Amino acid sequence: MITADQLLAHVVGDYILQSDWMATEKTKRSVAAAAHAVSYAVPFVIAFRPSWAALAVITGTHFVIDRWRLARFVIYAKNFMAPRSKWASWSDCAGTGYHKDVPPWLSVWLLIIVDNTMHVFINGLALEFL
């Protein structure tokens, strides 16, 4: 379901084709998130010629995940697998999903990893089944 070509398309779209403006503004402005989602989709169009449905899923979910930084909610939700006494409030975790006591460099990198995993997984499903 997930191929090296798909991973390469993801890296090119998410890192090489993303401008500094897109990266800094996509969580604040929908136009920046949309520009990033469209440029992100370009390598998938070139490499896979996906169906319209798959392309819509790849582009649309990329917009939604990045615009509202949804990976932080996934990260926060997994913390509920711990005993209740270890649960942190959302106000202490809202930035990255990790508690504010986690070193910032670590919480940001873990957020990036979860974000990338979400994109790659959804793209793989879209390319395989749509």
Image (cartoon, helix red, strand yellow):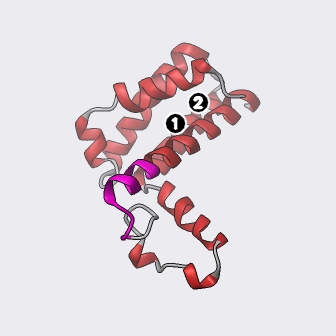
Count of picture labels? 2
Where does the N terminus fall, quadrant-wise?
A: top right
Secondary structure of the residue carrying numbered label 2: helix
Residue 113 located left or right of residue 6: left
Residue 55 - label: 2
In screen coordinates, is 30 left or right of 87? left
Q: List x then y, in percent, for residue 46.
A: 52, 14
> Residue at point 37% right, 64% down?
95
Quarter of image, res 22: top left
Q: What percent of the width, then of the height, locates residue 73?
A: 52, 63
**75 horizontally vs 81: left or right:** left
Identify whether 27 is placed above or below 15: below
Q: Residues within 10 Å of mark 2 (few under 14, many from 20)?
A: many
Q: Please, what is the dominant secondary structure of the magenta stretch? A: helix
Instruction: Check if residue 105 falls in the magenta segment.
Output: yes
Place residue 123 in its image quadrant.
top right
Percent x, y of residue 12: 42, 23
Residue 87 lies in quadrant: bottom right
Q: Is residue 110 magenta?
A: yes
Pick the front one: 124 or 85 = 85
Mark carried by residue 29 = none
* Residue 11 coordinates in the image, percent (x, y): 45, 27
Element class at badge 1: helix
Q: Which amino acid is tagged 1?
A: Thr
Q: Which quadrant would the C terminus be assigned to in this image?
A: top right
Q: Residue at x 57, y 45 (%)?
A: 118
- Would residue 21 be found to the left or right of residue 16 on screen? left
Q: Which mark is residue 59?
A: 1
Magenta range is 100-111
Pointers 2 and 1 in contact (C-beta within 8 Å): yes
